[in-house]
């Protein structure tokens, strides 16, 4: 039987253009219907547990600097949080801008204890300063509530005045952009490591996206890791169409090479 980790930590290979869009739109349509049903029951929907984590803010950072252990702790339980906090951590805060979007790797941890040793990290995506855009995750419809999710969370009341992404874009006269960042490869000492690269994206009420990175399959411990990420963004219309083909191709993509040098902790 597959565990939650097996599902989330699976590989995410490149798919032919249009396939990911078709799948994403089908899922989005289902979620849009779910959103309407939840709204009729008093607008209580499944909001992200990460929102709760971020509300703790100062408390979380007073104990642990970074987001990765806290996020994966919510996903998989307290043992995971403790094992990641005991791992080799690199506080990154390294950013790269692509068009109107800024990508920031928050922190990366080598998990050396427990199941599924490997690299785990957190990346934040936000609008660039001075831009007028609304960000959505890759598997999200413009007709969903802006900044919230219908899955991967806990029940939480959402204010009645929260707009959809389409409504927010119309109100601001802004573009809607889908943005993502995916691990392509991880190398140690110049040799590429085999492994499963997983990710999941969590929309935030402040307009940003927070994503997880998982690089597993018994990746060995090292003093330095070379990561290659594919960062990308493209415009989405108010009727949920991707502008990724000519003559209206808005698709920006770039390889981002990142060096991770975690502080190696002594074995207990």
Image (cartoon, grey):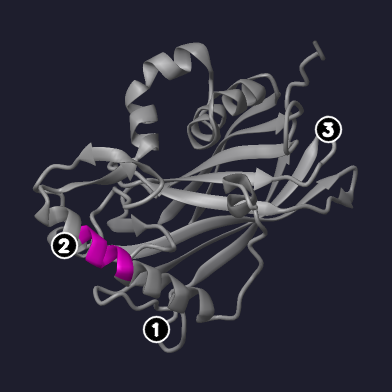
The label number, if any, that marks residue 248 in the structure image: 1
Please name the residue that numbered disc 3 is placed on: 221
Residue 39 visible in the snapshot: yes
Coordinates of residue 16 in the picture (x, y in percent): 60, 80
Whichever of callouts 3 and 2 sits on the residue coming sooner in the sequence is 2
Task: Report helix, strand or loop for mark 3.
Answer: loop
Q: Is residue 77 above or below residue 5?
A: above
Q: How far apart are the two marked residues, 3 and 2, measured between alpha carbons? A: 47 Å
Q: In which quarter of the image is the C terminus?
A: top right
Q: Dot 2 surroundings within 10 Å: few (below 14), some, or many (20 or more)?
A: some
Coordinates of residue 37 in the picture (x, y in percent): 17, 60
Q: Is residue 59 magenta?
A: no
Residue 143 visible in the snapshot: no
- Residue 95 as seen in the image, left or right of residue 127: right
Q: How far apart are the two marked residues, 3 and 1, measured between alpha carbons? A: 45 Å
Task: Report helix, strand or loop for mark 2.
Answer: helix
Coordinates of residue 103 in the picture (x, y in percent): 50, 48
Q: Dot 3 surroundings within 10 Å: few (below 14), some, or many (20 or more)?
A: some
Residue depicted at x 84% and y 32%: 222
Magenta residues span 30-35
CB-based contact (under 8 Å), mark 3 and mark 2: no
The label number, if any, that marks residue 55 in the structure image: none
Please name the residue that numbered disc 2 is placed on: 167
Q: How far apart are the two marked residues, 1 and 2, measured between alpha carbons? A: 22 Å
Coordinates of residue 137 in the picture (x, y in percent): 41, 58
Task: Report helix, strand or loop for mark 1.
Answer: loop
Q: In this view, does 83 lie above or below 132?
A: above
> Quick one: 4 or 162, which is closer to the camera?
4
Q: Which one is closest to the eye, mark 3 or mark 1?
A: 3
């Amino acid at each position: 039987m597959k565990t939650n980790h097996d599902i989330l930590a699976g590989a995410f290979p490149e798919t032919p253009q249009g396939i990911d869009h078709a799948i994403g739109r089908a899922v989005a349509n289902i979620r849009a219907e779910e959103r309407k049903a939840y709204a009729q029951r008093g607008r209580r929907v499944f909001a992200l547990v990460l929102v709760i984590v971020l509300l703790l803010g100062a408390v979380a950072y007073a104990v642990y600097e970074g987001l990765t252990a806290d996020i994966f702790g919510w996903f998989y339980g307290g043992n995971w949080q403790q094992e990641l906090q005991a791992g080799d951590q690199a506080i990154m805060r390294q950013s790269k801008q692509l068009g109107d979007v800024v990508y920031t790797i928050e922190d990366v941890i080598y998990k050396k204890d427990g199941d599924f040793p490997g690299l785990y990290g957190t990346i934040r995506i936000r609008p660039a300063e001075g831009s007028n855009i609304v960000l959505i995750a890759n598997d999200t419809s413009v007709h969903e509530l802006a900044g919230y999710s219908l899955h991967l969370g806990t029940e939480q009341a959402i204010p009645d005045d929260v707009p959809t992404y389409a409504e927010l874009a119309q109100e601001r006269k802004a573009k809607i952009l889908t943005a993502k960042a995916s691990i392509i490869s991880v190398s140690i000492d110049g040799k590429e490591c085999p492994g499963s690269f997983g990710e999941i994206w969590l929309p935030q009420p402040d307009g940003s996206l927070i994503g997880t990175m998982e690089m597993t399959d018994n990746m060995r411990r090292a003093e330095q890791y070379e990561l290659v990420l594919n960062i990308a963004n493209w415009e989405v219309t108010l009727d949920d169409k991707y502008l990724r083909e000519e003559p209206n191709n808005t698709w920006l993509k770039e390889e981002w090479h990142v060096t991770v040098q975690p502080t190696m902790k002594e074995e207990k």
